[in-house]
Amino acid sequence: MVEPGRDFVRAFGGVRRRRRGGHEAWVGEEFVCSAARALRLPTRLRPTPRVESARRFAVACSFRHLLCGAGPVARIEIGVSLRPIGDSDHAGRISADAVLGWTSALPVAVVGTDRTGTAAQATARLIEAGPALARALLHATTTMWHPTERDWVEAGEPLVFVDADPGELIDVPAPTRDLVAFEGHRIGLAHLRLSIGQRSARVWLMTGDRARDQDLARRLRLHLVRLHTERECLRMVLRRIAVGRLVVEPGSPASERLQRYLHHALGVLERRLPYGIAGAELLRTAAEYDDLVEPGVRTTLLDQLTHIRRQLLERVRRATAGPAQTRPQTIYYVQPGATMHQYNIKLGDHNVVHGDFVVAERIQNSFNRASEGDGSANLREQLQQLAREVADLVTRLPDEKAREAARDLDVLTQEALSPSPRRKWYQLAGEGLIEAAHAVGSIAGNVIKIVKGVLAILGS
């Protein structure tokens, strides 16, 4: 049992009771642990975003929390308040794009200890801080002399939640998906996906009269944040099962614990009227906004789970069946002064942005072909990973070389999955990718290793 004021998490901070308490539908929300020691703000939230007609802009960090729910789920939250000050009637209005771009790019420092107990610090933009925070939490919650593996604690996709008064948020991005306001309340929600460079984040925008609907606003915020956390954890667990990092051994204690977790996590997503929030059709949309596993991984996952209880296996099958019905749109934040077209390459559980439609289309087609092809599971996994690496590679190449690399990936994928692969064709395509990787250098090792692995499978 947690003892507020006495318990703590090493290198993070002490545990205290939440001022407004938790929620009866969610375990673990009544207590929070400070994360101020682990997540620091070296620039003190400067520079602040620009707001037209505002003389000054007041910013403050409201909280930095670590929360641990039931099972393997934990999340770190940081709350930032923005208050534009000026004489104009519009001084309190701010662009949604400015808020999202500024928040995601905030410089932060993650402070912890390494395996020897030596202090370590990593700096990053806020949207990129997840992996460093995961490592800090791993080291803070394991003994220093016990061997660990990095993926014991892993960061999921981050979530940005914007809470604004009526009229305060302007210029909401055009691709935002609006979700109808709750009947009888003055609160509306919309959601989208934000992409900055190679990183993406889910975004919820909530606007309305919080003074009148304070309880509903808090329940919505808590529910959506927790639902996102639970879903991300389930997605990562299922992927680890599919790739063999979590092995199901019939009758073992570890297998029983895994099945209890799957039963709980699937139950979270299956609730028809979530947590007493009336008119919550849009909350079910939140539970369906992305695939839990990539199409090419689903078959392998179900094969790995053949020894679990039949009813539970059927629930996993239903939860992972078919593409998501309602995907949020993606907006791209480009640094001021940059002008370019952006094309989204959807590579399973993450996206990559590229400015050339031909390059983006070839890589997307290659990934989809590898996900849905008839080749061996190992070959398809290698080709999917190669598509991810090439998507990163082409962002570092000149336009013409990027097109050549995308074409080589397309040829290699088609020939590898063909019933009768043509050796000369796939060898030339593989050599072209290796040459492109050498030209970049920084990620050459990954591309070369995967290409050679594919060629070895094909018998070259």
Image: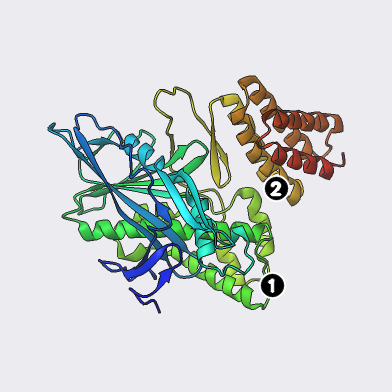
Instruction: Say whether residue 29 is visible.
Output: no
- How many residues crowd around disc 2 within 10 Å: few (fewer than 14), some, or many (20 or more)? some
Residue 310 seen in the current view = yes
Q: Tell me which residue sits at (21%, 58%) in the image.
A: 214
291 versus 339 height, above or below: below
Return the x and y of residue 142 as percentages of the image width and height. 55, 68
Q: Which residue is mark 1?
A: 249
Quadrant of the drawing holding the C terminus: top right
Rendered location of residue 211, percent (x, y): 16, 54
Furthest residue toward top: 400
Q: Residues within 10 Å of mark 1 (few under 14, many from 20)?
A: some
Q: Amino acid at mark 2?
A: Glu
Q: Which residue in the protein does label 2 denote?
A: 381
What kind of residue is marked 1? Glu
Which residue is drawn at the image coordinates 48% and 25% (left, top)? 341
For this rendering, which residue is in front, 391 or 264? 391
